Image (cartoon, rainbow, N blue to C red):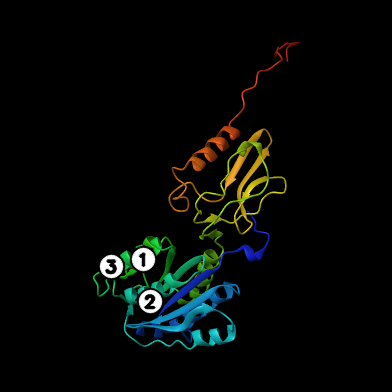
Amino acid sequence: MDIKQRKKYAQIAMVVIIDKSGSMTYTELGRQKIELANEGAVNVLDMLFENDLLGVIACDSVPKWAVELGPVKDEKAVTDQIASIRAGGGGIYVYSALLEAYKKLRASKANLKHVIIFADAADAEEPVGMNGEHSEGLVARMFEDMITVSSIAIGKVGDKDLEFLEGLAMAGNGRFYFTSDMYTLPQIFAKEAFISTKSLVVEEDITPVENDYTSVLDGLDLRGMPPLKGHVLTTAKGLAVVPYLTNAGDPLLAMWQYGLGMTAAFTSDAKSRWAAAWIGSDGFSSLWTRLVRWSLKKEESSNYDVNLVKKGSS
């Protein structure tokens, strides 16, 4: 569904982790890998909107914030900070970098939280942290706190850390990118930023607000239900009946007759992610019972007979 107003998009907090180890000094056609990775981070910046948050961590054996997580008020200043990242240290310490990103994102009130980690597929160190936790375990823990992780690896097929970096994206419910051509890095960063910033998922407390009347839900009051924890942004069709909105004014429940069929769209869920407090309640059961009965095909008796009369040989 198209969202008619840009302000409806969820706020995103994005952290980009850039490998600044010695291997990033590799030069081809007059440019270093680190320059192209920095250019990729600037592409991420270009995809964000004014209310979004960006942070950039430059990491070798120690993660350091090149850009502190926050709103981008001065794009030129942030671009200059990213461009100033220089390579030359040891291998990227993956666990430490992810943990640093996790601490800041966990404290953020943004609706969507995402990490992009870029690393050399042959030089990604510290798969296990000092506390014995594996990086994939940390990323899985981040996902439990609604923080997703995508990874970008550069190198060649068979590099020792390629599978490790791919596993991070799988555990973090993100995407994995692999390239052996360093000149494709800016485009890969841009693609990932485009995908992750266009999400229409809003995860925040939602209280149903009555809107259009429909006899299907007569007597059912969802306003006293506990808050839902999220929904997907949509725009209602012009002729749709929208019995309930979110407290932000977005459609929560919409109903529509399409031809002879009946359809209903509930923009939150019916599972434990967003509707955990609703499951098992009388209101929850009644809502779905009524919607299903309303949408079922109605049995009607026919008041006419059908006869076939054949004339001629055709």
Residue 103 is situated, as x and y percent measured from the top left of the image, at 39, 74
Residue at figure coordinates x 59%, y 82% from the top left: 73
Question: Pointer 2: what residue?
Answer: 100
Left or right of 241, for residue 272:
left
Residue 192 is situated, as x and y percent measured from the top left of the image, at 50, 67
Question: Pointer 1: what residue?
Answer: 139
Say if residue 176 shows up in the picture. no
Q: Which mark is residue 92?
A: none
Kind of residue sitting beneath label 2: Glu
Residue at figure coordinates x 49%, y 73% from the top left: 184
Position of 117 relative to 9 (above/below):
below
- 3D distance between C-alphas at marks 2 and 1: 12 Å
Q: Nearer the viewer, mark 2 or mark 3?
A: 2
Left or right of 210, for residue 91:
left
Question: Pointer 3: what residue?
Answer: 134
The residue lying furthest to the right in this view is: 312
Kind of residue sitting beneath label 3: His
Q: Pointer 2 and pointer 3: residues touching (CB < 8 Å)?
A: no
Kind of residue sitting beneath label 1: Val
Q: Looking at this view, is 200 or 166 the one in front?
A: 200
Q: Residues within 10 Å of mark 2 (few under 14, many from 20)?
A: some
- 3D distance between C-alphas at marks 3 and 1: 9 Å
Left or right of 283, for residue 244:
right
Which sits earlier in the primary sequence, circle 2 or circle 3? 2
SS at circle 3: loop
Which sits earlier in the primary sequence, circle 2 or circle 1? 2
SS at circle 2: helix
Q: How many marks?
A: 3
Q: Looking at this view, is 254 or 33 the one in front?
A: 254
Residue at figure coordinates x 27%, y 68% from the top left: 133
